[in-house]
Image (tube, helix red, strand yellow):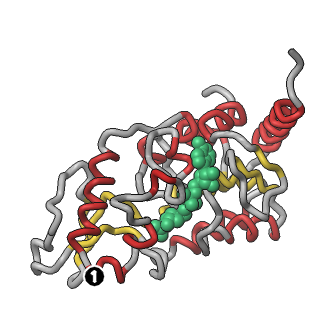
Amino acid sequence: MSPSTDDRKLTDSLAEARYLVGKARSVAVLTGAGVSAESGVPTFRSAGGFWKGLSAAQLATPEGFAADPKLVWEWYNDRRARLREVRPNPAHFALAELERRVPDFVIATQNVDRLHQTAGSRRVVELHGNIHEVRCTRCGETTDRCGVALPDEPKCERCGAWLRPAVVWFGEDLPVGAFAQAEAAARASEVFLVVGTSSAVWPAAGLAHIARDAGATVIEINPEPGSAAADLVIAAKAGEALPVIVGPAA
Ligand code: OAD
């Protein structure tokens, strides 16, 4: 049986991406929930992204937390517990390998799961914070509680106020400096990879446009691509496409 037109298109776009990434001296990457999907972490805008009938958009807001902090913590504790069971997938490992080869390399991730770092990536900008740290809503003290099970009503040991996950909620500003760092990397990149994001949330989604306007080739990897800035689209799962694009570890 001869390969279908779609298969040939995918093979060609993978080969082109492999060529472009292979010769680039500067690569920046924007990742979203899709990069962790093959590790078993549900994405935000999929059916599995709902919890007790509530969407992430209803739970991950300052208003949602103010209305019912215990409910929001139950959701985060559920996600934190699941994350203790998951491991990076071939997409995370391929990006960690790419970092070892490319002189200028940065991952700007919207994910809060730290799976890039677990896979060995070092230059990671966490645009939306991370789920392992907690921050006091009154005194601001931030502590890393990675791997620690928290109660559903966690309070600050110092001042007794509610703790919150050190993540960025809808309507909140990104961590100081994080976007500036990601923007600088996007501007400096020859190749900008957009991996596993619906490109629905700004300012993160704008990074691909910034990179393209500054002269980068933007490559999107997503079974359901959606970035308007992409020059080259690879309609495939990240865990299948990235190992092909990056190639085996040296
Ligand atoms: P979304 O859930 O919006 O999008 C996930 C994307 O991953 C979709 O475009 C899927 O098609 C794609 N996808 C699914 N499986 C994939 C795979 N195996 N390989 C590659 N792509 C795959 O998640 P994000 O774009 O990350 O923000 O969402 C952005 C932000 O919205 C999140 O960081 C979060 C959320 O609300 C905050 O919490 C502030």
Q: Name the residue under label 1.
A: 67
Q: Residues within 10 Å of mark 1 (few under 14, many from 20)?
A: few
Asked if residue 85 is positioned above or below residue 203 in the image, the reply reads above
Relative horizontal placement of residue 141, taking residue 53 as reference (left or right): left
Tell me the kind of residue under disc 1: Ala
Which quarter of the image is occupied by the C terminus? top right
Residue 51 visible to an observer of this rendering: yes
Q: Which residue is drawn at 83% across and 39% down?
A: 13
**Residue sticking out furthest to the top:** 1
Relative horizontal placement of residue 152, taking residue 67 as reference (left or right): left
Q: Nearer the viewer, residue 40 or 188?
A: 40
Relative horizontal placement of residue 148, taking residue 195 as reference (left or right): left
Q: Which residue is drawn at 25% across and 57% down?
A: 77
Asked if residue 176 is positioned above or below residue 76 in the image, the reply reads below
x and y, in percent, of residue 102 in the image: 67, 45
Q: Please tell me in which quarter of the rendered image ligand 1 is found.
A: bottom right
x and y, in percent, of residue 194 in the image: 68, 55
Residue 196 visible to an observer of this rendering: no
Task: Label 1: state its secondary structure.
Answer: helix
